[in-house]
Image (cartoon, rainbow, N blue to C red):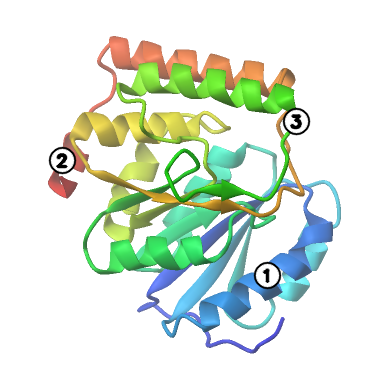
């Protein structure tokens, strides 16, 4: 990987978590591109690459690419889902501030810098990318069925969370390390519905969520289908709604981040 970055340390400033599943063709480009960007931020950083039980050459490539520099490789032996992979990365990260995004780097990388800036200045403990904000844009034409599915999902997610201004499925979110250490062990959803669950927990605890515009520049990989994956996510969301209705979420540990 080039350029040669600094070695990660216990006083790491920024961690970027990349969940990956069967992503071998993307690894080198994504890690080199992200490393070059992070090196330009002028802060200590690390990449935590979490392999969610991939069945292709992801493991071998990741081990080679992460042998040097700031990339750390974490492998889950079984495919557990994006939520579990992100949680593992967040809890193993060393950074004071922790951001996750997708392995294909779908959003322009300046969104990472903007997210980090809000966290590092103490303006927010949680920052979400939001494709609905003024200033957001897309260089990618998404299929009609996916766009319609996303709108329906967003409406349902907003009803469960109790607010409709969030873009829960935008694949870029950042947290202070302290908040991440409390929030992610509380999650029960392991797959794509985890964003809805963590949004609900933050909202119930009164933790402010700052939203930032993003520019979609790439969408090389999607491991969820509108029908199959969408149905599974709907079932996960139903579980979140039921636990909320039954008062099963104890958000008191999060209230100190208000």
Q: Earlier in the sequence, mark 1 or mark 2?
A: 1
| 240 relative to 217 in the view: left or right | left
Question: For the residue labelled by badge 3, is the local secondary structure a helix, a strand or a loop?
Answer: loop
Of the two numbered discs 2 and 3 in the rendering, the one whose residue sits closer to the viewer = 3
Of the two numbered discs 1 and 2 in the rendering, the one whose residue sits closer to the viewer = 1
**Percent from the top left, x then y, of residue 109?**
56, 65
| Quadrant of the rendering where the N terminus is positioned | bottom right
Of the two numbered discs 3 and 1 in the rendering, the one whose residue sits closer to the viewer = 3
Question: For the residue labelled by badge 1, is the local secondary structure a helix, a strand or a loop?
Answer: helix
Question: For the residue labelled by badge 2, is the local secondary structure a helix, a strand or a loop?
Answer: helix
Between 109 and 12, which is closer to the camera in this rendering? Answer: 109
Q: Which residue is mark 1?
A: 31
Give the spatial CA distance, label 2 vs label 3.
40 Å
Give the spatial CA distance, label 1 vs label 2.
35 Å
| 252 relative to 153 in the view: left or right | left
- Label 1, residues with CA under 10 Å away: few <14, some 14-19, many ≥20: many
**Percent from the top left, x then y, of residue 116?**
38, 65
Q: Which residue is mark 2?
A: 255
**Percent from the top left, x then y, of residue 247?**
25, 15
- Label 2, residues with CA under 10 Å away: few <14, some 14-19, many ≥20: few
Q: Residue at x 59, y 55 (%)?
A: 107
Q: Residue at x 29, y 68 (%)?
A: 120
On screen, residue 181 above or below 133: below
């Amino acid at each position: 990987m080039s350029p040669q970055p600094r070695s990660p340390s216990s006083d790491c400033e920024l961690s970027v978590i990349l969940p990956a599943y069967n992503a071998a063709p993307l690894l080198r480009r994504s890690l080199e591109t992200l490393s070059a960007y992070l090196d330009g931020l002028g802060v200590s950083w690390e990449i935590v690459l979490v392999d969610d039980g991939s069945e292709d050459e992801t493991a071998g490539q990741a081990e080679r690419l992460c042998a040097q520099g700031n990339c750390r490789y974490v492998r889950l032996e079984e495919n557990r889902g994006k939520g579990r992979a992100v949680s593992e990365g967040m809890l193993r990260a060393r950074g004071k501030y922790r951001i996750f995004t997708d392995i294909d780097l779908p959003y322009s990388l300046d969104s990472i810098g903007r997210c980090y800036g809000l966290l590092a200045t103490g303006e927010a403990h949680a920052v979400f990318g939001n494709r609905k904000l003024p200033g957001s844009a897309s260089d990618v034409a998404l299929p009609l069925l996916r766009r319609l599915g996303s709108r329906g999902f967003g409406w349902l997610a907003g009803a469960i969370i109790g607010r409709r201004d969030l873009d829960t499925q935008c694949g870029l979110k950042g947290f202070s390390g302290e908040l991440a250490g409390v929030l992610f062990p509380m999650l029960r959803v392991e797959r794509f519905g985890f964003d809805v669950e963590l949004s609900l927990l933050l909202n119930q605890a009164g933790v402010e969520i700052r939203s930032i515009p993003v520019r979609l520049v790439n969408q090389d990989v999607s491991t969820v289908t509108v029908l199959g994956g969408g149905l599974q996510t709907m079932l996960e969301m139903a579980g979140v709604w039921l636990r909320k209705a039954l008062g099963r979420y104890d958000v008191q540990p999060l209230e100190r981040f208000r």
